């Protein structure tokens, strides 16, 4: 199936390129955000590859979320796993925000924990409590008991993913936009599993890393290695089924000191990214270390196509630390969406300017859209990003 999907994706990207090329001269003169141009179909993909684009593209982490009343009609009635693992519901929840705001990509409604059962790790998302993971990982024996990540049949273990992505792939084409897939990074999924739930200090994980460092118990490094293989293959499975970009979420980077990041999180993420890039060299991969902006200099060589940065670093400084050759995404403070229309538009322009001007980066928040965010604010952000032609325009 991968060969047929890769041949179909390559033919579609060729036709996109040709339409983009023929319209590039006219695109720059179009300033109205509501006018869709042929280049919009893959503008996010091109930006993620590091290409300069005709304007700055935009999507938002947690753009499919509880800030939307339409979304809450589902989230208040159905438990998370039912919503994310029922194709009709997951596709509807993925599409609602794009219908309303026309971001430059549709992202599959899912969770970074979704593939854990492929290794035999049991989890649920409990209302009011968040994710709960029931499989204990403390010893090398615990890791050895897990399924072999090289033998996973994703179609059998996660049958809903194929249907969700196949449907969204068609929807993205009809909507003239891109389809974004995503995975959690190995350190984050490892720490989440070890802690069993959200954690303030990740103490159990850190004790395991220290035991691993001394060689007395290698459970942590063995576990993140298994996760890296599974995650890399899971991302490839998403691409085989229509994802055009993959974002790798290191959601718990704030739990890793620069030392632990360099020693455990980074090599495991690099391994997962390498698996993706070796199988799908033309599909861009974005790496996002939430809380990792204090060690951005360690992220220049992740092996991905683009680095997404959190909101705790100034975009101009992030651009300087990463250097001119590392494509960048980010990084508006999500709370700006609770401000006035003028404040939101100014923040958008400031971020674009600091990233190098229109078409020089991929605009996003520096974390997800917060619950309670006014819906119209998301529209103001997206519209201003699409409209902005630069300081001198």
Image (spheres, grey):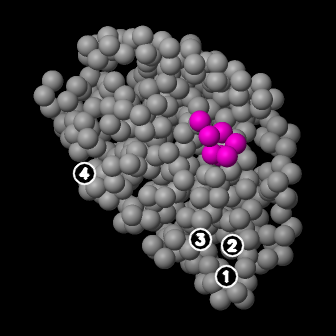
Tell me: 142 left or right of 106.
right
Q: Quadrant of the C terminus?
A: top left
* Residue highlighted by disc 1: 212
The residue lying at 26 percent from left, 41 percent from top is 356
Q: Which mark is residue 264?
A: 3
Q: Is residue 285 visible?
A: yes
Against 315, residue 50 (above or below) is: above
Q: Earlier in the sequence, mark 4 or mark 2?
A: 2
Q: Is residue 32 magenta?
A: no
In x, y percent, where is residue 136?
75, 70
Q: Earlier in the sequence, mark 1 or mark 3?
A: 1
Q: Earlier in the sequence, mark 3 or mark 2?
A: 2
Q: Nearer the viewer, residue 46 or 219?
A: 46
Report helix, strand or loop for mark 3: helix
Residues marked 1 and 2 touching at CB (< 8 Å): yes
Report helix, strand or loop for mark 2: helix
């Amino acid at each position: 199936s991968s060969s047929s999907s890769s041949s179909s994706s390559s033919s579609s990207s060729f036709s996109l390129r040709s339409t983009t090329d023929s319209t590039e001269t006219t695109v720059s003169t179009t300033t109205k955000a509501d006018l869709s141009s042929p280049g919009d179909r893959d503008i996010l993909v091109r930006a993620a590859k590091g290409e300069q684009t005709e304007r700055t593209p935009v999507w938002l982490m947690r753009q499919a979320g509880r800030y939307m009343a339409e979304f809450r009609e589902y989230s208040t009635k159905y438990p998370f796993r039912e919503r994310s693992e029922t194709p009709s519901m997951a596709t509807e929840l993925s599409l609602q925000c794009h219908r309303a705001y026309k971001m430059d990509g549709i992202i599959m409604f899912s969770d970074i924990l979704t593939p854990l059962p492929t290794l035999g790790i049991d989890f649920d998302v409990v209302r009011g409590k968040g994710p709960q993971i029931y499989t204990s990982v403390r010893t090398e024996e615990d890791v050895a008991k897990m399924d072999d990540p090289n033998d996973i049949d994703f179609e059998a273990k996660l049958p809903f993913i194929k249907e969700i992505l196949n449907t969204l792939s068609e929807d993205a084409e009809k909507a003239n936009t891109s389809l974004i897939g995503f995975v959690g990074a190995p350190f984050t999924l490892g720490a989440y599993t070890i802690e069993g739930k959200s954690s303030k200090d990740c103490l159990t994980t850190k004790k395991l890393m220290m035991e691993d460092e001394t060689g007395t118990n290698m459970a942590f490094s063995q576990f993140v290695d298994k996760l890296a293989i599974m995650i890399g293959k899971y991302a490839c499975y998403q691409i085989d089924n229509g994802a055009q970009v993959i974002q790798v979420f290191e959601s718990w980077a704030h739990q890793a000191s620069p030392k632990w990041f360099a020693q455990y999180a980074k090599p495991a993420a690099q391994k997962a990214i390498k698996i993706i890039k070796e199988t799908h060299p033309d599909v861009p991969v974005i790496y996002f270390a939430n809380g990792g902006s204090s060690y951005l200099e360690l992220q220049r060589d992740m092996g991905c196509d683009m680095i997404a940065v959190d909101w705790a670093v100034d975009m101009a400084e992030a651009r300087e630390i990463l250097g001119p050759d590392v494509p960048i995404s980010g990084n508006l403070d999500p709370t700006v969406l609770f401000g006035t229309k003028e404040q939101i538009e100014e923040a958008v322009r400031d971020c674009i300017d600091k990233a190098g001007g229109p078409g020089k980066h991929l605009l996003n928040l520096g974390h997800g859209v917060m619950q309670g965010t006014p819906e119209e604010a998301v529209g103001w952000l997206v519209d201003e990003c699409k409209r902005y032609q630069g300081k001198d325009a």
